[in-house]
Amino acid sequence: MREYGFRFYYRAASGSSARMRNRFILAPLTLLFALPVPARPPQSPPARTLNELSNWAMRPDAQSLDAPVLRRSLSRAEAETAVDLLDAARGRKIAASAKSAIGAKAITIGDRTLRWESRRFGDAPFGKRSLWISMHGGGNAASSVNDRQWRNQIGLYQPAEGIYLAPRAPTDTWNLWHEAHIDPLFQRLIDVQVAVNGVDPDRVYLLGYSAGGDGVWQLAPRMADRFAAAAMMAGHPNEAGVASLRNLPFAIFMGGADSAYDRNRIAAERGAELERLHAADPGGYVSMTRIYPGLPHWMDRKDAEALPWMAQFTRNPWPKRIVWVQDDVPHDRFYWLRIPDAVAAKAGDRIDAAVDGQTITLTGKVPAGTTLRLSDRLLNLDRRVRVIVNGRKALDGRVPRTAAAIVASLRERLDPSSAATALVTLP
C-alpha cells in the first residue's frame, strides 16, 4: 500500500541565525500526492552529533559539561553550526529570565542595581542593532544631583542608528562608574540587550561625560574586548593607563580651558601617548583627540562628532595581538586569554600575546593554568598549535574543537562572535 502525505524539511539558519533567535528557514515544502514516502535514511555521525547537541541544549537541566556529546571532537563546519545552535538556546534562556529586568529597566547583582533609560534610532534588523552605553556625570553628590545628570545624559547624543542607553549609576560616590560592581553589571546589561533587543555584540560602544568620562578612562581598558569603540568626554583617568586599548579605537574630547584637576593637560598627554603607541604598532591604538581651544568643561555639544567616528568601527574579537594590563579591578578573561584566578592578579600585571601563523607567543606575568580560548578565526585548528610562554615551549600539538568549549564561552557571555570552539589550559 502506498503512503501519502506532506513532508517538511527544516534546518537551522546558519551564519546570522544566532542573532535571528528562534527563527528557522523552512525549505522546501514538498507535497507528495500519489508518491511513496521512503524510509528516512540513517543519520551520518556529524548529523547525529548535532542532533544530540540540540536535544541536550533543549533540556532544562542542561548544566553539566561532562555530557559525552559535549566532549566529542568537532569539525570546523560542525563547530560553526554548534555555535549558532548553542547561542540560540542560550539566548532564549537569557531572554526568558530577563523579562522582569526589561520591564523594570533595571538589573540587580547582589546589593547593586543598575537602572537605565533608552531610545532607539534607525531601523536595523534584529541581530544587527548597535548599542551605545552613555554614562552620566556627577558623582560625590546628592542623589537628586546625579539624577539630573542622568536625565541630561539621556538626551545628550543621538546616534544615526542603534539603541542609545543611558544607565543610572548604582551609587552616588565620586568613582560611581568605576567601582568593582560596574563591570559585571555592564556584562549582564550587554547580554540582556543582545538576547532581547537584537544587539550585535560586535557593535557595542561606550561613552561618558565628566564623571562618566572618568568611567570611560577606567572601563574601556578593563573591558576592551566587549566594545567596538569608546569615547571619553571631559573626564579624568586617575591611575588608569592606555596600554590595554591596543585593539579598541579610543577618542578623547576635552575643552581647552577645562583645567580642573589638570584634565586638559592630561587629555593632551594621553592623546599623544596613543599616537606614539600607534606609530610603534600600526596595527593597533587607533585614536582621535580633540582639545577644543577656549572651551570649558561643557563643550557645547561639539563632542557629538564622536558618534559618527565611533560608528565606523566594529569589534574584532580575535585580534592577532593582545596587550592585557590588569587594573585595580581585575578580570579573568580578555579576548582569547583566560587566567585561572582574577583575585590573585595584581594591578599592573601585564601579558603580551601574539599569533604568528600557528604559533602563539605569551610574555609577561602569565600564571600557571592560563587558558587559551581558541577558534579557527584565530588560527587553523586542523593543524598543530605551538605555544611559547616566556621563551619556553608550553604546547606543540593539535587542540580539538568541542561543544564544551562553546558552552563555557556562552555561559560567560552571550557573545557568539567571541565564543571559543577549543580550549587548552597551559601547565
Image (cartoon, grey):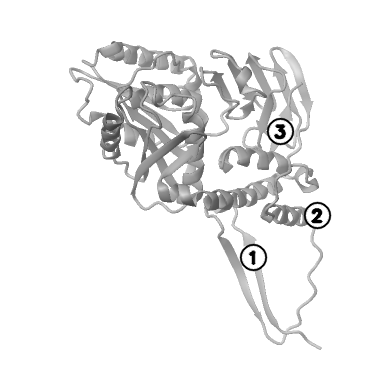
Q: Which residue is mark 3?
A: 423
Tell which residue pokes out farthest to the left in this image: 294
In the foreground, 231 or 361: 231
Asked if residue 187 lies left or right of residue 369, the reply is left
Relative to 198, residue 207 above or below: above
**Would residue 67 appear left or right of 80 to someone viewing this image?**
right
Residue 330 in the figure: left or right of residue 290:
right
Q: Secondary structure at mark 2?
A: helix
Q: Earlier in the sequence, mark 2 or mark 1?
A: 1
C-beta proximity under 8 Å, tags 2 and 1: no
Residue at 51% in and 42% down: 191
**Disc 1 marks which amino acid?**
Tyr
Q: Which quadrant would the C terminus be assigned to in this image?
A: top right
Closer to viewer: mark 3 or mark 1: 3
Residue 99, position as x, y percentages in the image = 48, 52
Q: CA distance from mark 2 to mark 1?
A: 19 Å
**Crowd rating for badge 1 (residues with CA inside 10 Å; few <14, some 14–19, many 20+):** few
Image coordinates of residue 323 in percent, x first then y, are 55, 20
Residue placed under numbered mark 1 in the picture: 10
**Foreground of the two, 337 or 146:** 146
The three-letter amino acid code for the residue at tag 2 is Pro
Task: Give the mark nearer the N terminus: 3 vs 1.
Answer: 1
Q: Are marks 3 and 1 in contact (CB under 8 Å)?
A: no
Does label 3 or label 2 sit earlier along the sequence?
2
Q: Is residue 273 visible?
A: yes
Q: Position of residue 72 (x, y in %)?
A: 79, 44
Residue at left offset 76%, top offset 79%: 37
Q: Is residue 146 above or below residue 38?
A: above
Q: Is residue 223 left or right of residue 274?
A: right
State the image quarter where residue 254 is shown. Answer: top left
Look at mark 2 in the image and give the residue it sits on. Answer: 45
